[in-house]
Image: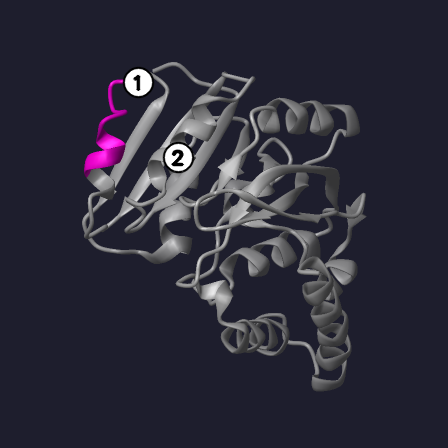
Amino acid sequence: MKKYPVSIIIPVHNAGKFIDDTIHSVLAQTYSEYELILVNDASEDASLELINTFADRENFRIIDLKEGKGAAGARNTGIDAATGRYIAFLDADDLWEPEKLELQLEFMRKNDCAFSFTGYEFADENGISVDRIVRVPARLTYKQALKNTTIFTSTVMFDTRHISKDLIHMPEVSSEDTATWWKILRNGYTAFGLNKPLTLYRRSGGTLSSNKVTAVKRVWNLYRNVEGLGPVYSAWCFIFYAFHAVWRRL
């Protein structure tokens, strides 16, 4: 089996409405040396049938989980199966700009960084930009990231020559993605931001992140029960988190 420099992992759960567009945004990449790992997480809709239409592509790998593992478990399954030096995540309803991989790889090699993320745009349910661009800082350390949860899952990329797969594995907690970024940064790494909107973040009414109360509870749980921060420091970080979260949507 041919090994590709980049492994792209997409967890798929009941994403039949969006997954075809998402896959085609990968196929449109100007950088083509990648393997695409699609992890079907016990979908009950037509997701598996849709992704199986791409099964004859040499660089596509489809993993069918009969029992649901959730987003973290599906991504971890993809991480374990990945053969590429670089690992990138893409959610099943998001879209990449055609130059996303090419520009991000160039950025990581130029800056010799192990963990990178990019800017992104909000999009409506049809994948059309709503002209809200999220700018990202040049760098984020652990303490900075506690106050600024701007790292978005579909924009990240890791160099596994510097960060082990075990460290990239996501915990089984709510907001598992943010918990993962904090875990990696807490271990001494710095996240480098490429301030270009290279991903479209599709927002629909049924997504978990659309429930603001739930989002607040998830983040507070990360501070207190995952990171083990005291109530005063948690509240201090949360004030900045809330400011940045609101600012991103203005």
How crowded pointer 2 is (Cα within 10 Å; few <14, some 14-19, many 20+) is rated as some
Q: Is residue 113 above or below residue 110?
A: below
* Image mark count: 2
Label 2: which residue?
A: 21
Given contact means CB atoms under 8 Å apart, are the residues at marks 1 and 2 in contact?
Answer: no
Which of the two discs, 1 and 2, labels the residue nearer the N terminus?
A: 2
Q: Residue furthest bottom?
A: 231
Circle 1 SS class: loop
Q: Give the label on residue 57, or none.
A: 1
Picture coordinates of residue 167 (x, y %)? 55, 48
Q: Which residues are magenta?
A: 49-57
- The residue under label 2 is which amino acid type? Asp
- Residue at point 20% right, 43% down? 46
Picture coordinates of residue 97 (x, y %)? 57, 30
Instruction: Inspect the magenta stretch and tell me whether residue 152 lies in it.
Output: no
- Residue at point 25% right, 42% down? 47
Report the side of 242 relative to 219 (left or right): right
Picture coordinates of residue 168 (x, y %)? 53, 47
